[in-house]
């Protein structure tokens, strides 16, 4: 399938027509440390899971982007620990794209105890748009339909 057809398929996917849902997951025992608290290293995984979930919902599945020659590495990660999370807890992660340029974007995340407004964790990640050669690309020029989908996700802070 050509890149243009892939881009049209992304833009016309039914997932791209609604506000994305938050990402919910249960904390596994192996993700906790000796204090029965989620080990800090797991938060990067949770954020990635939530980010990929967001992109899937909006019609931008990561595997499709990779097939088109777009990769999106993490440039920065900032975590802010507010309350402990432990084994069996159900968390709800709300990712939001807060900045977008033609070469990179930034997300902010809030992690809540599921079903409540109890904020447990805040985080921020920034990402670049690279080609399969690992060189920066101007997404707006090279893949305008994909850039447009990202722009639909941007929320004011």
Image: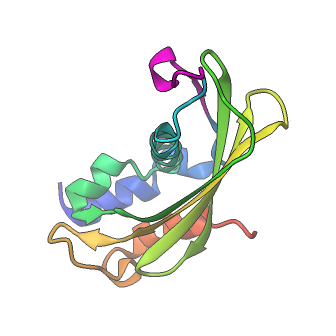
Image-based side of 72 in relation to 78, left or right: left
Question: What residue sits 83% from the left and 30% below the top?
Answer: 116
Q: Quadrant of the C terminus?
A: bottom right
Coloured how?
rainbow
Front-most of residues 22 and 7: 22
Q: Residue 78's quadrant in the figure?
A: bottom right
Give the quadrant of the N terminus: bottom left
Q: Is residue 130 above or below residue 88?
A: below
Q: Residue furthest front?
A: 34
Q: Residue at x 38, y 47 (%)?
A: 61
Quarter of the rendering containing residue 37: top right
Is 5 a magenta residue?
no
Q: In the picture provided, is 143 more to the left or to the right than 153?
A: left
In this rendering, position of residue 35 left or right of residue 150: right
Residue located 35% across and 82% down the image: 138
Vertical position of residue 145 compared to residue 45: above or below: below
Q: Which range is magenta? A: 24-36
108 left or right of 105? Answer: right
Spot occupied by residue 63 in the image (x, y as percentages of width and height): 29, 47
Q: How far across and how far down the image is residue 68, in percent?
A: 23, 61
Outermost right residue: 117
Q: Nearer the viewer, residue 34 or 100?
A: 34
The mark tally for this picture is 0
Query: Residue 139 at what x, y percent from top left?
Result: 37, 77
């Amino acid at each position: 399938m050509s890149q243009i057809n892939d881009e049209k398929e992304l833009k016309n996917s039914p997932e791209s027509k609604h506000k994305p849902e938050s990402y919910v997951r249960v904390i596994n025992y192996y993700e906790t440390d000796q204090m029965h608290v989620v080990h800090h290293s797991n938060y990067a995984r949770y954020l990635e899971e939530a980010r990929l979930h967001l992109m899937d919902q909006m019609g931008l599945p990561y595997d499709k982007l990779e097939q088109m020659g777009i990769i999106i590495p993490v440039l920065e990660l900032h975590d802010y620990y507010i309350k402990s999370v432990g084994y069996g807890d159900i968390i709800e992660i709300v990712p939001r794209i807060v900045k977008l340029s033609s070469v990179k974007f930034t997300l902010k995340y809030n992690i809540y105890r599921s079903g409540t407004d109890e904020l447990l964790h805040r985080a921020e990640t920034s990402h670049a748009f690279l080609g399969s050669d690992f060189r920066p690309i101007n997404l707006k020029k090279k893949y305008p339909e994909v850039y447009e989908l990202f722009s639909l996700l941007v929320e004011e802070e």
